[in-house]
Amino acid sequence: MSRRHDLELFLKGVDLFRNVSAKDRQWLASYAREKSFTKGETIFLEGRPSDSVWLVKEGRVHLLHYLSEGRAQTTCVMTPGESFCCLPTLDRGDYPATAVAATRASVLQIPTRIFHELMGKSPAMLQDTLCVFGSRLRQVEAKGCMVHDPVERRVAQALLTLQKKFGQTIPLTRQEVADLVGTTVETVIRTISRFQKEGWIRSTRGKIQLLKPDALIQLFS
Amino acid sequence: MSRRHDLELFLKGVDLFRNVSAKDRQWLASYAREKSFTKGETIFLEGRPSDSVWLVKEGRVHLLHYLSEGRAQTTCVMTPGESFCCLPTLDRGDYPATAVAATRASVLQIPTRIFHELMGKSPAMLQDTLCVFGSRLRQVEAKGCMVHDPVERRVAQALLTLQKKFGQTIPLTRQEVADLVGTTVETVIRTISRFQKEGWIRSTRGKIQLLKPDALIQLFS
DNA sequence: TCGGATCTATGATCCAGGTCATACCCTCCA
DNA sequence: TGGAGGGTATGACCTGGATCATAGATCCGA
């Protein structure tokens, strides 16, 4: 099993490229560069000029904005198969957020030029890109609407969203959840403890297990 | 001066269509439908299927999300020449927000189909659309980052942003500013009063005049 | 296997800003 | 021309959640 073959196989499973022909995918693979990062390493910084599209191959990558004094606001948690920061590829602007490897991770870097050529060739892929892009915008707007909800709801919402990515067991620390919902560790710890007392979730160090998602959904009615 | 000619002239000044040929613009004009709304009227509702792109021709249009019990979160203030809700046109989804006329307003409705044909014909226009779209995403993300700032800063930021649209004198009520920054009228009134006492702004009923924008900018350093 | 770092937990305190109540003023229009 | 509704203003009060402090538990590297 060659490295190259492995790469093509991975690309085949990526949503963004499902409408790309086998031949083009092969061509694409020849330009993709694989990079590895250790936990906590920065992949790129907000505001820097962009010349690549990125894909998560293994591990977990967070997009975030640094706020004042060490605080961070995480805007997106990316898992294998997801692309990130294609925005600059479309509007030729800078990176809109910082990307950090939240675990040991390997990512693929694809030159903007290659991506553009691919979109030019295939209207279907252009459409797919726009949809990924659109769902990102919708997601960000939806999040913007809940910022004034009480913390309990925001935590519940975050857990439900993460459930879609990770299944029943969510591998995030309370600090990471806090950065994601825009609050402090202490508050997340208290909230999670309450959920646990209710029997809705079970949690161990670095893991949160949803036992009764429906109870969390109930918080919104 | 015919109604039709007036329309074409207006379209010529719209950023989105600056790369469209005179002929195509004429064709576009023949499909655009003008609609008038009185202050407070709803143009379309969040969640409804979309089949049009919209342009503000006269007046002021707000995009917003209704929250619980009468509260509203305004996400965008649109002035003449701006397009809104092209997102569903790209990803074929529903309206991501509600649009209401904040003043008596006239808007242009352009069928999605026509817009698509135009993009298909002109790569330059496709690129322009993506840029408009991208700047919207960037704007929403930027806003998402400041939600945890103190209200004073958010009001200042909102005023500075509005200044870019309206110039020195901003024609919004305190209630409208409150909906925009995600707080209450009372808090905006107190904040604005403070700014006024400092001599940074001057305000009358329904108007806010920025006297020293630099002082507001200073709040961020 | 030890020691530091990271994660989780819990109590005490504080305050920005939401909520409620009241009042005045301006504008519109019946 | 007067009355109703909307915009502005201000005080009193209350609370969700941030902040600070402390400590046990678990993990990991040397």
Image: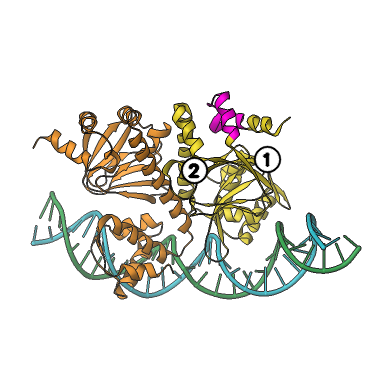
Chain colours: A yellow, B orange, C green, D cyan
- Residue A5 position (above or below residue B70): above
The front one of B22 and B47 is B22
Residue at image location 41% in from the left, 65% down from the top: B153
Residue A69 tag number? none
Residue at image location 71% in from the left, 50% down from the top: A203
Asked if the stretch drawn in magenta spans residue A17, the answer is yes
Disc 2 from disc 1: Cα separation:
21 Å
Asked if the stretch drawn in magenta spans residue B153, the answer is no
Residue D27 placed where, x, y %?
Answer: 78, 54
Q: Quadrant of the N terminus of chain B?
A: top left
Tell which subunit mark 2 falls on.
Answer: A
Residue A139 tag number? 2
The local secondary structure at tag 2 comes to: helix
The answer to whether residue B16 is visible is yes
Magenta-colored span: A11-30
Disc 2 marks a residue whose amino acid type is: Gln
Q: Quadrant of residue C26?
A: bottom left
The local secondary structure at tag 1 comes to: loop
Residue B184 placed where, x, y %?
Answer: 38, 60
Residue A3 placed where, x, y %?
Answer: 70, 34
Residue A168 tag number? 1
